[in-house]
Image (cartoon, coloured by chain):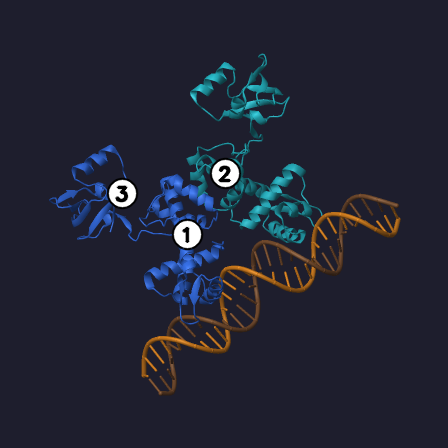
Chain colours: A blue, B cyan, C orange, D brown
Amino acid sequence: MRNFTASEENYIKAIYHLEMIHGKVSTSLLSGEVQTSPASVTDMLKKLQSKHLVHYKPYRGFNLTETGNKTALDIIRKHRLWEYFLVNKLGFQWDKVHEVAEDLEHISSKELIIRLAAYLGNPLFDPHGDPIPDNKGKIKLLKQSSLALVPIKQTVTVSSVKNQSFEMLDLLKHYNIAIGSKIKVQRKFEFDGSVEIKVEKNAATVISNDVAINVYCLL
Amino acid sequence: MRNFTASEENYIKAIYHLEMIHGKVSTSLLSGEVQTSPASVTDMLKKLQSKHLVHYKPYRGFNLTETGNKTALDIIRKHRLWEYFLVNKLGFQWDKVHEVAEDLEHISSKELIIRLAAYLGNPLFDPHGDPIPDNKGKIKLLKQSSLALVPIKQTVTVSSVKNQSFEMLDLLKHYNIAIGSKIKVQRKFEFDGSVEIKVEKNAATVISNDVAINVYCLL
DNA sequence: ATTAATTTTTAGCTTTGTCTAAATTTTAAA
DNA sequence: TTTAAAATTTAGACAAAGCTAAAAATTAAT
């Protein structure tokens, strides 16, 4: 895997994200995403094509190649690992880390990322609940989110618990909630943010907003 | 404090280091340090002068301004904090961290460095024993080094102990070695790396290489 | 005190990544 | 289906940071 400039990496990452949403990507779409003029996008695309990172036909839009995709996942892995570090080690608020991670992700040392990932315990999700690709570029398809944010009527699978205090785990045990449990969100009470849920085949119960916020799920 | 490009920062840092050794700095000296042609150095100096970071008279050498000096210390602080992180948190060997820190030091987030320093426990020395400037740019003048590496006949002051196990502290107490003790290195034995020292006014004793390696001193 | 050697600066070019304005191609509409 | 609108590409410029070769200034040496 060769090294790329920060600018090239930003384009690659942006194309990856747009592909997720729109399939094929257009010049103007990408120009919006990377905040440059359409003309600059065309220039960069010719460069990325010459490096075999995108399939590109003038006027016809473009897509990442196999290599381009792998490269994008590599950058996203770095970005999300750094976000995890900033929140869980340095104590940043989860909504304040994006900009800094945007810079850190371009540091190229392979060993740094291997060691960082190990130091963090090889986390699977970043602080926003987005999956972190593994070192082979394999990515969990699902997004993790707090139970408090799961839309009504959805059934989700518990994947992690934020507050791991004894008291919390004790309470979860009482509700029969464990990692892997399937939970259906039935109702949300505006007054205090409490949530009515059905855990597996058990009868419905109501959990407080405090609990709901701490339970993370895959939808 | 404005933001500078990575390139500007590298020049500033290099000028700082050369000033330490040579006082006034010349174009060719700096060109050697930053690995560019003398012509490029001249170009950059005109730019740094226009930003009030250096005092510069054509053909007459140059020096950092007050602002330039403060900027250099800021970069050095970042560099050394990252080195500390890489060694003490990620488990890098101390002689493998320079290159990576060279990249990390250019990340500009103020909050990142404040939090990183706190996370590391506001260390005073990097893994090479070099002092880490504080957030006001104040720097300990002395270099820290393992007692095992202190040249013979030198008198040094104990500043920290690496292995803080009970057994180690017990042994140090036996030798009357404490933080702040003045130690004179009298002899080194090739065979096992043991060192003959005189602690304050006490009679000379020999300490093992194992102990010498763990005692850090200011020279 | 000239001259020779060394150092530094200037001049002119190159590469990246950006821009605006003009030209071209595609898409949409009458 | 011809034309107008929108999107894309090309052309030409610019700033940053580097280069080489030539010119100018300083330093050292006879």
Question: SS class of the residue under badge 3?
Answer: strand
Q: Quarter holding the C terminus of chain B?
A: top right
Name the outermost residue toward the top. B203
Amino acid type indicated by mark 2: Glu
Labels 1, 3: one chain: yes
Residue B100, how many percent across, how many down?
51, 44
Q: Tag 2's secondary structure? A: helix
Marks 1/2: CA distance? Answer: 24 Å
Residue A90 visible, this orientation: no
For marks 2 and 3, give the CA distance.
33 Å
Q: Are marks 1 and 2 on the same chain?
A: no
Relative to B118, does residue B52 appear above or below in the rendering? Answer: below
Q: Is residue A167 left or right of residue B9?
A: left
Judging by the rendered image, the residue that carries numbered circle 2 is: B83
Q: Which residue is under mark 1?
A: A74
- Chain containing mark 3: A
Please name the amino acid that badge 1 sits on.
Asp
Report whether residue A12 is seen.
yes
Q: Which chain does the numbered disc 2 sit on?
A: B
Describe residue B161's horizontal placement relative to residue D24 as left or right: left
Few, some or many C-alpha atoms within 10 Å of disc 1 (few <14, some 14-19, many ≥20)? many
Foreground: B102 or A56? A56
Could you tell me which secondary element the residue under label 1 belongs to? helix
Indicate the quadrant where residue A19 lies. Answer: bottom left
What residue did someone put label 3 on?
A160
Q: Nearer the viewer, residue A34 or B35?
A: B35
In the image shown, does B48 or A43 lie closer to the viewer? A43
User: Does residue B211 sit above or below B110 in this rendering?
Assistant: above
Quote the CA–CA distance across marks 1 and 3. 24 Å
Give the residue type that dot 3 points to: Ser
